[in-house]
Amino acid sequence: MSRQRTALVTGGASGIGRAISLRLAEDGFATAVLDLDAQGAEKVAAECREKGHEAVAFGGVDVSDRAQVDSAVQRVRDTLGPVLALVNNAGVTGTTAFLKITDDQWDQQLAVNLSGPFYLCQAVLPGMIEAGWGRIVNISSSSFHSGQPYMAHYVSAKSGLVGLTKCLALEFGPKGITVNTIPPGFIDTPMLRESERKGLIGGSVDHHAGLTPVRRPGRPEDIAAACAFLVSEEAGYVTGQVIGVNGGRNT
Ligand code: NAP
């Protein structure tokens, strides 16, 4: 990379987002670690800095609130420069029988998992257009391939994110901006362990690992590696794509 570019990772305090933040910082991006969890975001940014990389935490930011998103993106620009790589990773999950999903539950899933990326993309795209270069990676879910009972709200939002990805890839390709999605499958993070603890994944993580073609759960670093490629200079001809990272669970 000829000069340091700025990356913004939402949900950067935990799990997949933490691994992506550490990896992009290591790859030379000045990294903005954005999360609702202020302490966690600061911890990850400090980890990056301890390794000699530039990173700043933007904690206490709710991606489902447009005003908070706009203000945070402005602060990132003032502190680190315009965001040229955006990873929409923050997400919430939920498990409820379809006939019992309330309007509030539906709205929350859509707000965090789909409207959040919409707000973030609108906030950073002008800077990318100005620079004539940009990379957006949307973290969807492998459940978009297969569907998932009791998760209609979550899967609908994550499927919408795939549609958003494809539309933006077509609209902004001529401006030097690529937009792709990674739908992770079965990655060992606090979110997955919480679902296991609540008995929501139909067996243990180990049991499911045995059914996965590569015979292990995914690691956050597996997603970070794919993401690192998609935001790199050399991925400039890859756009509008769904890059599944799921150990072969969805083919
Ligand atoms: P995680 O460990 O729960 O991390 C998610 C992070 O996002 C948390 O730090 C959380 O903060 C933050 N966050 C939640 N809502 C937010 C909001 N409104 N604004 C800002 N930050 C918010 O989850 P993960 O497993 O790493 O998942 C990361 C992404 O991958 C999610 O989009 C998830 O849907 C997707 N995914 C994961 C898997 C998997 O197997 N793990 C599979 C498919 C898709 P708090 O802790 O404060 O809430």
Image (spheres, rainbow, N blue to C red):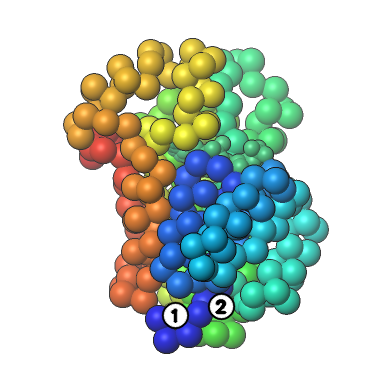
Left/right of residue 179 with respect to residue 77 in the rendered view: left
Q: Residue at x 50, y 80 (%)?
A: 4
Q: Residue 55's quadrant in the figure?
A: bottom right
- Say if mark 1 contacts mark 2, CB within 8 Å: yes
Asked if residue 87 shows in the view, the reply is no
Left/right of residue 78 with respect to residue 185 in the rendered view: right
- State the residue position of label 1: 176
> Considering the image in quadrants, where does the N terminus appear?
bottom left
Q: Quadrant of ligand 1?
A: top right
Q: Residue at x 31, y 75 (%)?
A: 234
Q: Residue at x 41, y 68 (%)?
A: 27
Q: Which mark is residue 41?
A: none
Element on which disc 2 rests:
helix
Left/right of residue 63 with respect to residue 96 in the rendered view: right
Q: What is the three-letter code of the residue carrying label 1?
A: Gly
Give x and y (percent) for residue 223: 38, 49
Q: What is the three-letter code of the residue carrying label 2?
A: Met
**Front residue of 221 and 195:** 221
**Front residue of 244 and 99:** 244
Q: Which mark is residue 128?
A: 2
